[in-house]
Each structure stands twice: as structure tokens, then as C-alpha cells.
Image (cartoon, rainbow, N blue to C red):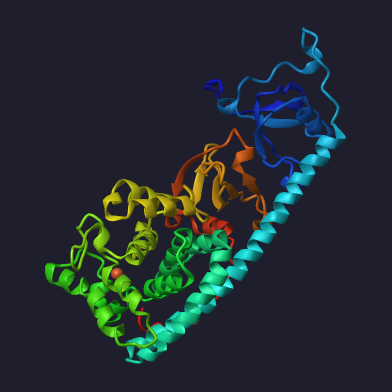
Amino acid sequence: MADFDIPEYRVSVDQLLPGVFIRLERINWFNHPFLFNSFKIKDETQISILQSLEVQQVICVPEKSDCLPGKPRAQRAAPVAKAAPPVESTLNELWRIKHERTKRLRKKKQRIAECEQRYSTSIQSIAEVMNAVTTGDISAVGKGRSLVDAMVDSFLQDIESTLHLMSVMTPVETVYYHALNTAVLSLMLGRDVDLHAKTMRDLGMGALFHDVGKTVIPKKILRKPTPLTKLERERFEQHPALGVDMLQYSSGFPPDALSIIYQHHENMDGSGYPQGLQGEEISNLARITAIANVYDNHCNQLNPAESYTPYQALSYMFTKQRTWFDKDYLALFIRILGVYPPGTVVQLSNGALGLVISSNPNNQLRPSLVLYDPEIPKKEALVVDLSEEPDLKIEKSIRPAHLPAEIFDYLSLRTRITYFVDPVGS
Ligand SMILES: [Fe+2]
């Protein structure tokens, strides 16, 4: 790309050349076959297509162009090849791609809506079980079993939609969500570690109830926005032991899952609590849950403005907290989620904002996105596969809380579902 330090200007289509970056104006996105309203002219056929659409002028963006527009064709001294007529097949192909992208988004939204419905149902069940356990009815724990079986059957079948939902939840929903997210993420990791079905169930149960001890910690400590005092910290750090006290005599709770409750804050380097265990001293299942737990805590902070993006959370865990985790499990976790997990909001090199909807197994840096474009209605939002757009790349990920509400709403792809969750325990 040449470095033309001149402002944008309007230019006749007749002056366009391959390499000029243009922005279309006065033509609705639905009335042209190009995927974008702004793009770099690739060949003469594209110029011919613009002419066939009777577009007279476009905006030239010198900063992004390889060359500047030339003289009108008729005035060019050197003989130039006549612009190729719009090739019917190219035009048809462009429209086909554009329609296919829209259809793909509709299917994706449908899957997300179904997944959200399952999440909603699971949250209801978790709320009921947690409330029962909090009031002393530990027999309710047994219901968690069928919940975990349902999780394996449903959420692990569509990891993309599940990760998407985890990233776009609103803060009021985080309490039971943390239990559900941690369990689902642990199960994703557990499945790829090739755990036996019975062990998977233990993992799911332990992860679901990992913080059950917090239900007896004062809310003013749990929700304190400023750093805890030494005494408050000591009280807080009792929650693993309190959780074990609550469930160790419950016939419905698998004994092998107790280690998850007791050890989910232990770190591989011995810096965790309550016992300061190291390496192999920590159970396999607790090591798996610790990764899921920390990841979800990073992404869903008490103050949403402080929440990390999935990309930031994984980067932080890998660079700053690596010694806390089992290194093989952490590497596997990052591989499962991808560099930009579905649900990550990103800014592209052309300034556009997008939301990752699926990762590309062959190139983690080039996932598929849905793009924010106020000129295109939300339900027709454009899906772009970055592996097919060499001119575009991801510049950075953006915290959802930093996005204006209308952009977040546009990108979240969510249908509104109301959660009738009893706030007790939140
Ligand atoms: Fe915890």
C-alpha cells in the first residue's frame, strides 16, 4: 500500500484503476453485489460492474490505495485495454456469496437462540438446586447429575454457540452463570483430555458446585468493590473448606468431586490456597476446573468495565499466570477456545468492528466475523470470513462494556430471553 498523505476525494468511476481503494456512496448495500461498501478495486471487471450499476462517482481513499485514480479513459494517452464488460458469471457469483453469507448468519442465530434456551433452562435448575442446598436441603444436589448429563449432551455439541453466549451475557446474569460457565468450560477441557464418562460426570458436578461454600460467606465480602482486608480475605478463603463441609455427607454428591471444591484455588506453583499444594498434589479434576474458573472470572468481573475480552483473558493467563496452571491443560484450553474465541469483539485494520462467530481451525488469527454496519439492518448483518479477505486483519479485541449499547446489541446476535431467577444466593 502506497503512502498517499492526501484526504479522501470524490472521483469518477471512469478514472478508477485496480489498486484504488474506494467507498461507495448513494447506493444501498442491498443494491450492489459487493460484500463491502468500501474495498480496494481488484480488477477491471469490478470497474465494469460499477458502471453497469450506473454508479457515476465514488469516494477515493488515498491512504488505503496502492495507486491513485488516472485520467478519464477517453483522455488517456497510452492505449489502455478497454474495461472488460461485466462478466455475468462474476456478477452472479458475487450475489451468490452475498446471499450465502446472510443465510449462514440466519442459521447461526438460530443455533445461538437454541443454545440460549438450553442455558436458560440450566440456569433455572442451578438456581433451584443452589437455593435448596443453601437452605440445608443437600438432597437436592442429586439433581445436579442430570444437569451435568444434559450439559455434555447439549453444550459440548455446539461449542461455538456456547462460547458465544458466555461472552455476550449481561452482568445481572453472572452469578449462576459462573457456576454453569465453569462447569461447561471444564467439561470442554475434560472431553479433550479424554476423561472417562464417569469422571466427566464427577468433573461436571465438582465444577458446578465449586463455589457452593460462598453461599455462607457474607455478601458484603463477596461483593466488596475495593480490596479485601486481611480478615476479610481469610474469611473469603474459607469457601473451599466450607463447600466441602456442606457436601461431603451428601449421598448425591460424588466423593471424587470433593477435591474440586477443596482445591480449585490451589496453584501448580504452590501459591494458591487453602493448602498451598503443588503440582501433582493437586487433583487432575481440580487443575482442569481451576483453568475454567479463572478464565470465566476474568471475562465476568463484578464491574463489567473491568472484564477482559476472551482474547485478553487467555493472554493474561498465558503470560502472567502461567505458573498457576497445568501447562498441558492450559495449552489445550487455549487450543479449544482459539486465539479469538467466538463472542470476541474485534476491531479490524479497516476500522470496522466485528464479532467473532466461528474460529478457523487452519488459521486462528483469521476467524469468521459478523460486522457492524449501521447501514445494514441487524438481521441482514454481514458475515465475513477473514481467511478469504487477505486485505483485512484483526487489530485488537475490544471489551464489550466499552462498546456503545447499540453496537453491542447489533453484534450480540441474541434474542431477548428473560430469566426468572430467584435472586437468593446471588
Ligand atoms: Fe472459588
Question: Taking 349 as reference, is 8 above or below it?
Answer: above
Where, quadrant-wise, is the N terminus in this rendering?
Answer: top right
> Where does the image place residue 112, in percent across and percent down from the top left?
60, 65
Q: Quadrant of ligand 1?
A: bottom left
**As drawn, which residue projects farthest toward the front?**
196
Q: Which residue is depicted at the point 32% across and 55% down?
A: 326
Where, quadrant-wise, is the C terminus in this rendering?
Answer: bottom left
Q: Nearer the viewer, residue 183 or 6?
A: 183
**As drawn, which residue projects farthest toward the left?**
230
Question: Taking 91 as reference, is 236 above or below it?
Answer: below
Q: Nearer the viewer, residue 39 or 160?
A: 160
Q: Nearer the viewer, residue 242 or 52?
A: 242
> Where does the image place residue 114, in percent across and percent down from the top left?
62, 70
Count of labels in the image: 0
Q: Nearer the viewer, residue 338 or 422?
A: 338
Quadrant of the image occupied by residue 283:
bottom left
Q: Which residue is depicted at the point 59% across and 48% down?
A: 368
> Where does the image place residue 53, in percent across and percent down from the top left?
82, 36
> Where does the image place residue 333, in percent across and percent down from the top left?
43, 55
Q: Is residue 226 left or right of residue 255?
A: left
**As drawn, which residue projects farthest toward the top?**
77
Residue 123 visible somewhere in the drawing: yes
Residue 422 visible somewhere in the drawing: no
Q: Which residue is depicted at the point 67% across and 51% down?
A: 376
Quadrant of the image occupied by residue 407:
bottom right
